[in-house]
Amino acid sequence: MLILCVFAFFITTIISGLLVRRARRHARRYPGGMPQRFHKGDVPRIGGVALACGMGCAAFVGMFNTLRGDVANLNLGWWSIVWGLCMIPAVLGGLLEDLSQRMSVRWRFLLTFTSAALAVWLLGASVPRLDIGWLDGTTWLWPWLGIGIALLAVAGLPHALNIIDGYNGLACMVAIIVSLALAHVSLQVNDRALAAMFVVTAASSGGFLLWNYPRGLIFAGDSGAYLWGSILSIGCILLVQRHEEVSPWFPLLLLIYPVWETLFSMYRKWVRGSSPGMADALHFHQLIYRRIVQRVFDDDNEARDMLMRNNRTSPYLWAYTVLTVLPAVIFWHTSWVLMLFCVFFAITYTAAYVAIVRFKVPDWLRW
């Protein structure tokens, strides 16, 4: 497993560095007036290419070792290649958006839904239960309800990760934290194959993070966010599907931050009469940037000030993510506790959002 991590980390690091040096022309195409733009200069937005190369090379090395004898008992057979093939439509749609800036939300969702349909068809991905007695006992609902939840999760999570991918290191670190938590639970149930896939995801993301944080030399873009969302959503479903002791609410609590951010954003846009797919600058991380993180410098170096504030925004959300991951890892087999934490997060998130909007933020939260 260690050799796979080394391959993923170094290949992603090297390709990210090459993109930083060679993709400046592509970066100039990104419009400067976008509401989610919080940086100065032209920064390449195709970090998903480096992530895909790192993860793909590590997967092939794992397959080669498995065919040669699989001393580490990882069992990375053809199913891991099928997993990668399922993600191609989603990642390709994100990459086309990164390169052209012309892919509508509808088309991108159609491509992520195609990836979800492929995962259901080729991998048999389905949520087998919800640990709610009366619902699990309704036989005519299953397996169709499980398939529907799997389709919604795999199609929706890439967009949820894309929404929170607004500042240096934010979505990348969330992906690393969640991947390591999933790897830990996979090892707890002795599923070394899934653990290897999650650890490779974390290692590849770490290689990308070296260039993304704190200097922001390259961004993951839609392709990177869709890659993270696809691999994490499919992996979560397979983990719950393979092991009855893993609660289906465990992955939801792990990913409750991007999931609830997406649902809450859709709600507030609907209330305002706006399209849910329209970009704006009122997401939780953007409010933290504007109303909690203070200006760092008093000089006229706007680019330097923006970069420093950008870097100081992400740790707030990293800490928020850790506060949900810790109870998820501790109570990964106890559904009712996980449900309570999901509800608690939704309430605290909403309360914090309202407090920031109304300028009622404690002084100790301001840096």
Image (cartoon, rainbow, N blue to C red):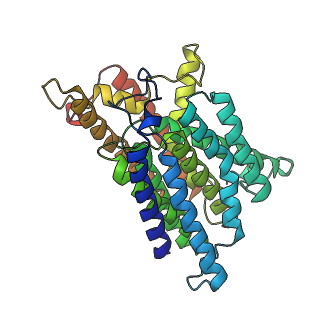
Q: In this view, does 34 lie above or below 17?
A: above
Task: Provide residue 273's location: percent of width, then percent of height.
Answer: 58, 13
Q: Which residue ends up furthest to the left in the rendered image?
A: 298
Q: In this view, does 36 lie above or below 255?
A: above
Task: Provide residue 198's location: percent of width, then percent of height.
Answer: 53, 62
Q: Which residue is drawn at 55% across and 29% down?
A: 101
| Residue 259 seen in render | no
Res. 277 image quadrant: top right
Q: Is residue 193 above or below residue 156?
A: below
Q: Residue at x 29, y 23 (%)?
A: 360
Q: Which residue ends up furthest to the top in the rendered image?
A: 273
Task: Provide residue 281's location: percent of width, then percent of height.
Answer: 43, 23
Q: Which residue is drawn at 59% across and 40% down?
A: 94
Compared across the picture, whether 105 is left or right of 279 comes to right
Q: Which residue ends up furthest to the right in the rendered image?
A: 140
Res. 303 image quadrant: top left
Q: Residue at x 42, y 35 (%)?
A: 166
| Residue 150 seen in render | yes
Q: In this view, does 279 lie above or below 20?
A: above
Res. 33 image quadrant: top left
Task: Provide residue 240's location: percent of width, then percent of height.
Answer: 65, 60
For the C terminus, the quadrant is top left
Compared across the picture, whether 216 is left or right of 68 comes to left
Question: How many numbered circles are shown?
Answer: 0
Compared across the picture, whether 162 is left or right of 129 comes to left
